[in-house]
Amino acid sequence: MEVSRVRALRGPNLWSHDTAVEAIVSCTTQELDIAQLPGFEARLRALFPQLSPLQPLGNYNAAPMAQVLELAALGLQAQAGCPVTFSRTTPTLETGIFQVVVEYSEEAVGRLALELAQQLCQAALDDAPFDLAGALHQLQELDEDVRLGPSTGAIVNAAVARNIPFRRLTEGSLVTFGWGSKQRKIQAAEMDGTSAIAEAIAQDKELTKKLLDSAGVPVPQGRVAIDADDAWAAACEIGLPVVVKPKDGNQGKGVTVNVTTREQLTAGFIAAQEFRDDILVERYLPGHDFRLLVIGNKMVAAARRDPPQVVGDGQHTVRELVDQVNLDPRRGSGHATSLTKIRFDDIALASLAKQGYVAESVPPVGQRVILRNNANLSTGGSATDVTIDVHPEVAARAIAAAHMVGLDICGVDVVSESILKPLEEQNAGIVEVNAAPGLRMHLAPSFGKPRPVGEAIIAAMFAEGDDGRIPVVAVTGTNGKTTTVRLIAHLLTTSGLRTGMTNTDGVYIEGRQIDSGDCSGPRSARNVLLHPDVDAAVFETARGGMLREGLAFDRCQVAVVTNIGAGDHLGLNYITTVEDLAVLKRVIVQNVADSGVAVLNATDPAVARMAKNCSGTVTFFAADKTHPVMATHRAQGNRVVYVEDGKLVAAQGQERHEIALSQVPITRNGAIGFQVDNVMASLAAAWAVGLDWKTIALGLKTFANEADNAPGRFNVFDYKGATLIADYGHNPDAILALVQAVESMPAKRRSVVISGAGDRRDEDIRQQTEILGAAFDDVLLYQDQCQRGRADGEVVALLRQGLNGAKRTSHIDEINGEFVAIDKALARLNEGDLCLILIDQVEEALAHIAKRVAEASA
């Protein structure tokens, strides 16, 4: 078995809505049916007993090794605790070659699972050992390393529950929610609206206390000490007992509490110096350690934090008791679990010594032994939810403290005997204000009720009903995609929306190109969704990007499918038939939002059938309103767009809107059929987004299909009284549409300049010139700059074969070079002639034509 071309499908894809790893798997003849491998399945199940049952696969009527790989990769992830359920093995037309798809929750984990599954299969083949426990441990450790921690994960889960899209920007906890101008970001439990100044204030414990004190919030008195002697002097000024801690510490690092002697203070000062030079000495407040979580203007959760401790049983040592506590599955070594293991370090030993114990002491039954002075969860402490116990005045002081510092999300640390009464009525106070507070103690407290703090954070970032989404229009098909994308973007821009657009020419933000080349894939679309100045987005969604990576978005508001043609790269990436292509193209339709719209070509059966795959509504378009699909759809009260009496008509029930084709220059008064189709699709998409009809009419009127607005899409020039048309059409369907368009334009003599893309099938290349040979007098053949895997002259030879027996063509030339061919064609033109130039290097060819036109008119 050989595994190749492993891809990560990072969005909705051909196989499912979930992220997945896809691999091409080649099996030997013997591996096509594992039943023919003596003892293999028995050895496999001995190595991995949890493997799912194997089922006969398709026409093979057997279980091939590729399916074993699939189920093993999924099963290993599931046994490691990953939330995955989907996998699939699909035979290709090549014997022994399969496409294996396995869902993942974390890409790195999915890739590792595939590798380990290969090792498992090989071990079963070789009758060799396989370390299942080690493999699962590997996957678990990697999953813990790369997945979001509990705090950030809770916020993400809350966003998903509200249908707010998210994207992880780093391997850490920086996450963006929403798209374009509606997006917000978090870093752990810190919002993008939190200022660096507020964070700096929170880190400066002394400054924080001064600000809180000025706002009337109770705080313990204290000051910074420059050395141990000064610290003792400060302690004497304040009055013992005191707390010694770093000025800008976090997670309780270097904190020593309830210091009553000079020796303890010196030791605490030295411990604090390990984390910071500036050491703070402040009055010790007796009581419990409470954490109050403030989000915006509300106190949303509170917990009492208890230091790491064990209770004696009269039999086990302190170390053994700690080991027993650490067996709790909720305790881990990092922040990925709800609790952290208790550590045996110098601080723990020092805490034991203060109580008269060492690690090997056996405490009496019921004796509580404290392992640390602070109660932070990160050092092994535990938490008890006390949210409902917080006195309103205490909550008000916590909110005031957060606002005084300027934090949107704030962890306020209170020390008091009770949280049931105001701080002023007891010797209590706020000892710290924390930016980016940990949420574990509220999400999964050791005791008490979990609190929905992730939901509270999302509610503070997005108002009720706001899902952070901008209108996203995805356009796919064989022909007309780029023009349709450009026209929809123009309509959105006309309405006042700042629009981002991707197509085969580049990436555009508000009409300004920020990237060039073929940008019809998911990477470019994701970049647009990240742009903060984008109010709406229109994406050309090509087959290649969907196959490589899936979609860039989880849902779109509008999906437009123009048509499905046989010349659209069939034979590549196991897409071999028009039916295969339709299944791929309908991915955008399957991922229309429930409230969204699919805009479909009613005259293309493969496209019209996609309607049943749309969870939203459907708008059909066709020039002929009497087409059965159109008539039925309209009779059912649904939206349709068609042509009637020289007008574009959009209708639904009694609603009807009309725009004269004479007011839509791109159609040349309706003479260019494929442009009429593009306009109908674009109009339907604009209607689906909710644009008003005056805006739509204005946008259609002001969209001219010039070289600078829609390069390579039926760009028309006048050259010495002859008509030049430049277009990028390079498949039989596009050629046929172009022929139908130019036949409506008068001409004395017709000529065409054409090359062919090498990544088409032979029959598709030949068919292009078969069509042209019946419509043009002269044909000039040239070779593309890039032959895309073909030998020199091979494409031109196929084009010439297509002209054998041409009904009209009387003259054929073979020219070396695109620009030379263009110049040769121009030199032959007379007034009243028409020349169709099928360009390859779009920008360069258009610039060359424009230069020649300018020279001729000079």
Image (cartoon, rainbow, N blue to C red):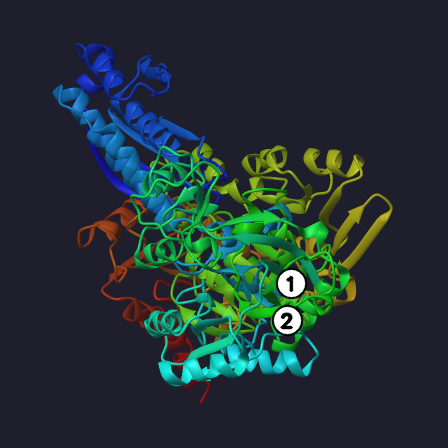
Say whether residue 825 is visible.
yes
x 42%, y 81%: residue: 231
Mark 1 or mark 2: which comes first in sequence?
Answer: 1
Say whether residue 92 is visible.
no
- Image disc number at residue 402: 2
User: What is the crowding at mark 2: few (fewer than 14 residues within 10 Å), some, or many (at least 20)?
Assistant: many
SS class, disc 1: strand
Q: Quadrant of residue 379?
A: bottom left
Residue type, label 1:
Val
User: What is the crowding at mark 1: few (fewer than 14 residues within 10 Å), some, or many (at least 20)?
Assistant: many
Which quarter of the figure is the N terminus placed in? Answer: top left
x 61%, y 39%: residue: 603
Q: Which residue is mark 1?
A: 294
Q: Is 14 located above or below residue 650 in the figure?
A: above
Give the percent coordinates (x, y) of residue 135: 26, 34
- Do the CB atoms of the residues marked 1 and 2 lie less than 8 Å apart? yes
Query: In this orientation, which residue lies closer to the viewer: 132 or 57?
Result: 132
Specify whether 227 is left or right of 722: left
Specify whether 345 is left or right of 181: left
x 32%, y 51%: residue: 344
